[in-house]
Amino acid sequence: MADFFQLFMDSFPALMDGLGVTIMLTVISIILGTVLGIFLSLGKVYGSKIVSGVITVFIELIRGTPLLAQLFILYFGLPPYGIRLPALAVALIGFTINSGCYQAEYLRGSIQSVSSGQIRAALSIGMTKWQGIRYIVLPQALRRVIPSWTNEFIYLLKYTSLAYIIGAPEMMTQAKFIASRNYEFFKVYLIVALIYLVIVLFFTQLFKWLENKVKIPGFEYIR
Amino acid sequence: MVIDKLQLVWSSLPNLLEGALVTIKLTIAGLGLGIILGLPLAFGQIYGNYLIRGLVSVYERVLRSIPLLVILFLIFYGFPNAGIKFSPFIAAVLGIGLRSAAYQSQIYRGAIQSVSGTQMKAALSLGMNRVQAFIYIILPQAVRIAIPPFANEAAIVLKDTSLAYALGVIELLRHGSYIIATTFEPMTIYLTIAAIYFIMTVTINTILGKLEERMKIPGIGVEGGSR
Amino acid sequence: MSKKEILRIVDLHKSFGDNEVLKGISLSLKQGETKVVIGTSGTGKSTMLNNINMLIPPDKGHIYLEDVDVTTTHDISRIRQQIGFVFQDFGLFDHLTAKGNIMIGLTKVKKMKKSEAEELAMFELERVGLQDFADSYPAQLSGGQKQRVGIARALAMQPKLILFDEPTSALDPELIGEVLTVMRDLAREGMTMLIVTHEMGFAKSVSDEIIFMENGKIVEQGPPEQLFNNPREERTKEFLFKLNELYGEGGA
């Protein structure tokens, strides 16, 4: 036990560096993914048949293939074509696209659940269709999608660990580095697991608290 | 140029399909283990006493909070520490299955609990005992409710078997990297692999969608799950 | 004194598939007039209102708001700002407070300054007696209160005319009165209104003219006393007779 504690203290600083990258990867990709998701969902719901069709195919292709395969395509597949990106950039792009497609689907459902009466009311006071979407539909859809969004954040937080496989310097990579010097693979990964556990629980509670803070009557979340 | 690539895809296909077979085995074994463990977990969570419910909750919480990759490494490096040795394949199945059990348990619990309490009362009022009521009344309804989220979970497990790559399991992605090592055509090979995965997820969704359709009863149906 | 004509509808037609809902409707509304459209459900009354601000575009015919032909205008949003619409299901924006519901059209459509919009919103809320509920969300309001917010939202846009599409049909009986009171006040203040309703008592007491529609056509129109007491058409008589059987003498 004392050994384990010592190991914990020794590896903690490096792991914290890795955790910083893990969280940065998560936060940036979830934000960019949200922006992408908004555009994809709006295009899917309100776009022309062609736009909507192309977006649907894209979303289904991304959702139907493993994230790791997507990272491999970006990391190993592009260099022969002259596009050589660092692992961290590949991870960011991969996570953003992947998360964007999942978020697009949540948002699409949410947009379609906003009643058509809301758009009619918006038109009736002289809004254009796009004003109605921007000021009436989207704010409601985004509110309703908050629980899915926080779930997505947690998923992404865990899936950023895949960046390790292409060598981006996140927490798992740091762990591997430490373990390959002291051969305490199991113990080091146990520490990583504990850190993930704490971080996930922290964010889960944080989101619960935030959801309560920003909740408005009529938009109670059903989990 | 395009002909060359098609040629390459064609000649790699036997090898890749061999990898796909391993991926399918991982998926079925992982899902199977998830069912075997997930069902008792769900029952424990619903019908168990305070202690059992607490333990199940902790299990679910922990397994759902740790990335699959970490779980796989813990199993891969942990059991040999305790003197138990097994192949990367078994380690992968264990990791995937143990995690899937945590998610599946939630699916089953949700499905059982969403069958209204009145149904149980009505069954008891006919003179059934609780076990009969569960088997004849609750279960047939819960199974139907559980199919869409189960299909979702199955697709997730299929895609996540790709993480077995990190343990050195020779699954689809690993087969691909072997081919790339000799052909230097990563884009073509990984796109082919992605296509194979896509066909497999679509197949899972189609099969389970058909099952859902066949078992459909008016009035029982729930929206599909999420990620 | 002949007042200015606000709305003129000429030979309006509308079909949904094979179902011809409007078969040539013509009517007009002068400034300050209140006209009430009555008739059984499914006779196209609501479709006609939705045609007027092009929420459902008509197939044929013309609609003039003052001198502008609504059916051919290139800026329908501009027209809609001038035509208030009160929905049967209230149409309140669920993510905005009562005040926010009124302000959003002012700030986003009319580009009014926020402080001005807020002032006007509070004024209109007071007009419908809901100044104390400015910060309540729709989910916190009763049906009657929601509808009064809906009316205040329409009023705030300072429309030339307000269309009411069965404004009390979704309300519990005890909440209908408060909405009708607000509407009665508006009529008295000289607002131009076209109202579809089943509230016959209200129709009798506030309208300048009753329009009886059936099967996509106007069967008869005239002052309330004449139409209710001395209908010329057989179909009108039958309709009123059925109403009396249902709700007793004098209507609901």
Image (cartoon, coloured by chain):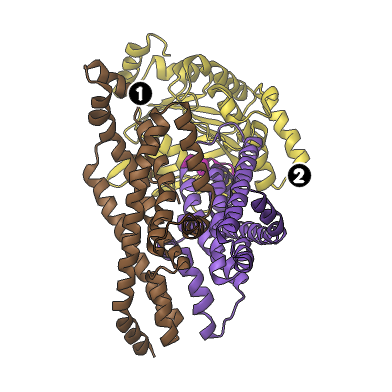
Chain colours: A purple, B brown, C yellow
Of A13 and A112, the residue lying toward us: A13
Residue C25 in the image: state x and y as whole percent. 40, 39
Q: Check the image and report above or below for C153 versus B35.
A: above
As drawn, which residue projects farthest toward the right? C115
Residue C148 in the image: state x and y as whole percent. 59, 26
Q: Say which mark, if any, is on residue C113.
A: 2
Q: Residue at x 29, y 22 (%)?
A: C234
Q: Residue at x 52, y 31 (%)?
A: C90
Reading the image, the residue beneath label 1 is B117
Residue type, mark 2 in image? Lys
Magenta stretch contains residue A215 = no
Chain hosting mark 2: C
Q: Is residue C122 visible?
A: yes
Q: Residue at x 60, y 51 (%)?
A: A196
Residue C112 in the image: state x and y as whole percent. 73, 45
* Residue B21 left/right relative to A54: left
- Where disc 1 sits, the SS reads helix
Magenta-drawn segment: A115-126
Residue B144 in the image: state x and y as whole percent. 29, 40
Q: Check the image and report above or below for A6 versus B141.
A: below
